[in-house]
Image (spheres, helix red, strand yellow):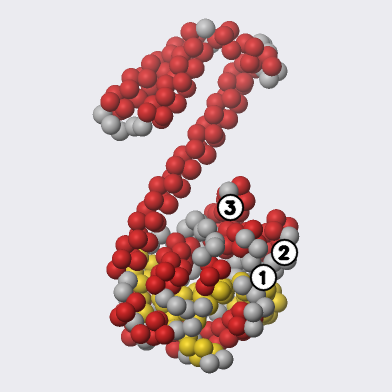
Amino acid sequence: MIELRIIGITVALLAIVFVTLRYRAGGMRRIDMLIAWVLSLGILGLGIYPDMYAPVFNALNFTEGNNRRIIGVLVISNVILFMLYIRTMGLSDLAQRDIRRLVQQMAQQSFDPQAHEQLREADIILIIAAYNEEETISDVLDRVPREIDGLKVAHLVVNDGSVDATGAIAKHHGAVVAHTINLGQGAAYQTAYQLVTSKLKAKIIAVTDADGQTVPGELERMVRPIIADEADFVNGSRMLGHYEEPESTIRALGVRFFSRLVSLMTGTKVTDVSSPWRAFRADAVQRLHLRQPQFQASELFIEAMRKGLRYKEVPTTMLRRQGGETRKPSTVPYAWGFVKAIVTTWMR
């Protein structure tokens, strides 16, 4: 026991010295230094006079004997570490948000709508976020309808930091391309929303993927409820339409689970929360506060329902990826990302 106390005292003193020197060198914020100091002093106190924490241990039923105090220290330490981890994630999210805002501002400043007549004259703009989709982007663009019920359609490809020929191929097939660095599909869509709503006159915004899993001709089905003034937000649902066999049974079950969870949270039935097909009234998009760089679909639904947008689902088709490699993470990180997006949006 005395050996553990000596180790604890040594570690605490070293931590205090390290943190102080790092702060003086400008490598640490004051709040972080204070947190580190408090934790180090707590460890130092535990090593010098363990009984000072006896009331806390007794209250948590970690009484003396059978190493229960040591177990108590480990449990409390894990709780503190978890809290610090949550704080670190929050700081990381803030830093990423600042980077996204900078990228979006740069994209806006470099984007000149006067140079793109098809976008200036369009009533409907289809946004396609693309990252290394040179194998599929041309086929997707070639099948987008150019007019729906007399309304002109244009497409805007957000090249999300691709390192292949995606951007060049999109331009060759008549698309307007906006370039950003790779921050995720959600961030790419946010950039595009800002470009369209701030610089163009389009009344309807639709989004889809560049991987060939959707049928571009179904754009008409997506926007018709908005044209008829029946909805502000339309979601394409593979569950109401048709989909080929999913990449995995677990992922298919995940779609159903998260759809039901979002339905429960919003009070609105959603059958396909991760659909790549969505359409909005342009003025409705301006009312949404979107922050998620990834797994943005759940945030979009929760925010839209909170703002009272009229919602409608239409049946759509979901095919297998037509080329290239999927950018989705493996099952566990994918599920964790979805949960995190839902929880943070709901709490916000």
Q: With respect to residue 342, does 323 lie above or below?
A: below
Q: Which mark, residue 345?
A: 3
The reply to whether callout 3 and callout 2 are in contact (CB within 8 Å) is no
Indicate the amino acid at tag 3: Thr
Residue at 61% of width from left, 21% of height from top?
A: 71
Looking at the picture, how far across and down is residue 297, in whole percent?
Answer: 57, 63
Q: CA distance from mark 3 to mark 1?
A: 19 Å
Residue assigned mark 2: 268
Looking at the picture, how far across and down is residue 327, in whole percent?
Answer: 47, 65
The crowd level at tag 1 (other Cα within 10 Å; few <14, some 14-19, many 20+) is many
Residue assigned mark 1: 311
Looking at the picture, how far across and down is residue 215, in whole percent?
Answer: 55, 83
Please tell me whether mark 2 sits on a helix, a strand or a loop.
Answer: loop
The reply to whether callout 2 and callout 1 are in contact (CB within 8 Å) is yes
The crowd level at tag 3 (other Cα within 10 Å; few <14, some 14-19, many 20+) is many
Return the residue nearer the eye: 162 or 35.
Answer: 35
Q: CA distance from mark 2 to mark 1?
A: 8 Å
For marks 3 and 1 on the same chain, the one whose residue lies earlier in the sequence? 1
Indicate the amino acid at tag 2: Thr
Return the residue nearer the eye: 272 or 249.
Answer: 272
For marks 3 and 2 on the same chain, the one whose residue lies earlier in the sequence? 2
Q: With respect to residue 170, does 17 lie above or below?
A: above
Indicate the amino acid at tag 1: Tyr
Q: With respect to residue 24, does 136 lie above or below?
A: below
For marks 2 and 1 on the same chain, the one whose residue lies earlier in the sequence? 2
Work out whether residue 67 can be spotted: no
Work out whether residue 41 can be spotted: yes
Return the residue nearer the eye: 287 or 135.
Answer: 287
The quadrant in which residue 248 appears is bottom right
Residue at 51% of width from left, 75% of height from top?
A: 205
Left or right of 196? Residue 279 is: right
